Structure formats: structure tokens, C-alpha cells
Image: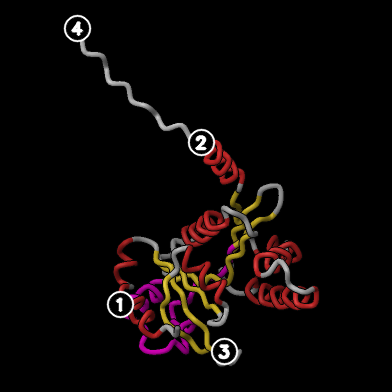
């Protein structure tokens, strides 16, 4: 009697898994320059409103569009502005922002001393400020969001992403945390007279390890 070679059963994706894989493959990421971003303003404003509150009143949606377009116009003028969009046969997501200057001015108003690791990353131009991550509501929106933010940061070889969020915007905070962002504290912006939460997204184990104390301090200060 001879030994028969062991036959390994290969995992066959189920129908639902195949559909999800096909949906992800259908989503294409594309980097656009400031002029193309400006031309997409109307579609991006629609995406912003849809990603925020699909059932919002018409008046609220109109104000939301105008506010978003105003912020987008300001960001497009910033040095180093960059945007990545996700699309199928239509626009389904985008992420954009700009590099943080080595002078550290972006961190002005941070509550407490800025951790040494963040100072070092800022001085070496390793921090990228993400203004917005917008994704059309969809069962796979988390995957699309993670791909967008990773592409945006990797294109700029950034070691750390940073984003500011209204502390009362609980849906946005919950989404960002589910996409891997960590609470880093609060920052006061005199120009808008607003206290905002700072979230950061480290890229690489070394950067994440250097931010352990920062994330711990933020958790202890975070209001319930």
C-alpha cells in the first residue's frame, strides 16, 4: 500500500465574499490636482452632504454645500494641496488635505505640550493634515475610507496624518476611530473661535509606538 499525497482543500469564496471582492475591485482610486478638484466642486459638495446626513432638510443641505465649497476653495489654495478620489461609474469618496509646515504653526493652540515625537515628525515634514475624508454610505465604506487615507498619506510619504473634528460631531468621530485614527487631544483655533478634537493616524509601527503616550493622555482627557 502506497501513501497517497495529501490533498489540501482550497478555500472557495462564498457568493457574498465574491460580491464584496468585486465591489472593492470596481472602486478605483485616482489622484487629482487642484484644478481638477476645483472642477469637481459640485460633485464633491453633493458627496459631502450625502456622507453627512442623507435625510437632512433641503435648507440644511444647501448651507452644508456652501460651507463645504468655501472650505474646499480655501484648502485648494494651500501649498501642497492634494486630493485622492474613489470612483466606480460615479464619485463615491474622496480625501484631501495639505502637508503640515516644518515651523509647527499648524499645531498652534494645542492643549498642553506637544509630544516630542510629533515635534520631530513635524520638523521633518512627516505630518500631513487631512481636511476631509468623505465616503458615500455603503456597506463597504470603511474599506474605501481606509484605502483613501492610506493612498493620500503614502503619496506624500507622510508618517503621521492629523485631522481636526468638532467634538460634538459624534458620527464623524466614531467613523474616524473605526478607520484607525487615535485621539490626540484638543486644539483651540482663534480664527474660528472653536475648540476642536485632534485625531492622528500613524503609519508604521515605529510611529505608532512613539505616540503611545499621546494617545493615552488624550483618552484620560476625553470627556464622556
Disc 3 to disc 4, how far (Cα)? Answer: 80 Å
Residue 194, numbered label: 3
Q: Earlier in the sequence, mark 2 or mark 3?
A: 2
Identify the residue at the far left of this view: 1
Q: Which residue is mark 2?
A: 14
Q: Earlier in the sequence, mark 4 or mark 1?
A: 4
Disc 4 to disc 1, how far (Cα)? Answer: 64 Å
The quarter of the picture where residue 190 lies is: bottom right
Disc 2 to disc 3, how far (Cα)? Answer: 49 Å
Q: Which residue is mark 1?
A: 213
Query: Tag 3: Cα neighbours inside 10 Å, few (<14), some, or many (≥20)?
Result: few
Q: How is the image coloured?
A: secondary structure
- Residue 155 is situated, as x and y percent measured from the top left of the image, at 50, 58
Q: Earlier in the sequence, mark 1 or mark 3?
A: 3
**In magenta segment, residue 194:** no
Q: Nearer the viewer, mark 1 or mark 2?
A: 2
Amino acid at each position: 500500500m502506497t501513501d497517497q499525497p495529501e490533498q489540501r482543500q482550497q478555500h472557495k469564496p462564498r457568493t457574498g465574499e465574491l460580491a464584496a471582492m468585486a465591489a472593492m475591485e470596481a472602486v478605483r482610486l485616482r489622484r487629482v490636482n487642484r484644478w481638477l478638484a476645483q472642477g469637481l466642486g459640485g460633485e464633491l459638495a453633493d458627496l459631502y452632504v450625502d456622507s453627512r446626513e442623507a435625510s437632512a432638510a433641503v435648507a440644511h443641505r444647501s448651507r452644508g454645500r456652501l460651507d463645504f465649497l468655501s472650505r474646499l476653495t480655501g484648502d485648494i489654495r494651500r501649498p501642497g494641496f492634494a486630493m485622492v478620489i474613489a470612483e466606480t461609474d460615479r464619485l463615491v469618496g474622496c480625501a484631501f488635505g495639505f502637508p503640515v509646515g516644518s515651523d509647527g504653526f499648524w499645531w498652534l493652540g494645542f492643549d498642553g505640550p506637544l509630544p516630542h515625537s510629533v515635534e520631530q515628525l513635524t520638523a521633518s515634514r512627516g505630518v500631513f493634515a487631512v481636511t476631509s475624508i468623505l465616503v458615500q454610505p455603503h456597506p463597504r465604506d470603511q474599506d474605501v475610507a481606509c484605502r483613501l487615507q492610506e493612498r493620500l498619506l503614502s503619496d506624500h510619504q507622510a508618517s503621521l496624518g492629523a485631522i481636526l473634528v468638532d467634538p460634538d460631531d459624534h458620527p464623524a468621530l466614531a467613523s474616524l476611530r473605526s478607520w484607525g485614527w487615535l485621539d490626540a487631544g484638543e486644539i483651540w483655533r482663534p480664527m474660528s473661535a472653536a475648540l476642536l478634537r485632534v485625531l492622528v493616524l500613524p503609519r508604521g509601527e515605529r510611529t505608532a509606538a512613539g505616540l503611545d503616550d499621546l494617545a493615552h493622555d488624550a483618552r484620560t482627557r476625553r470627556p464622556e
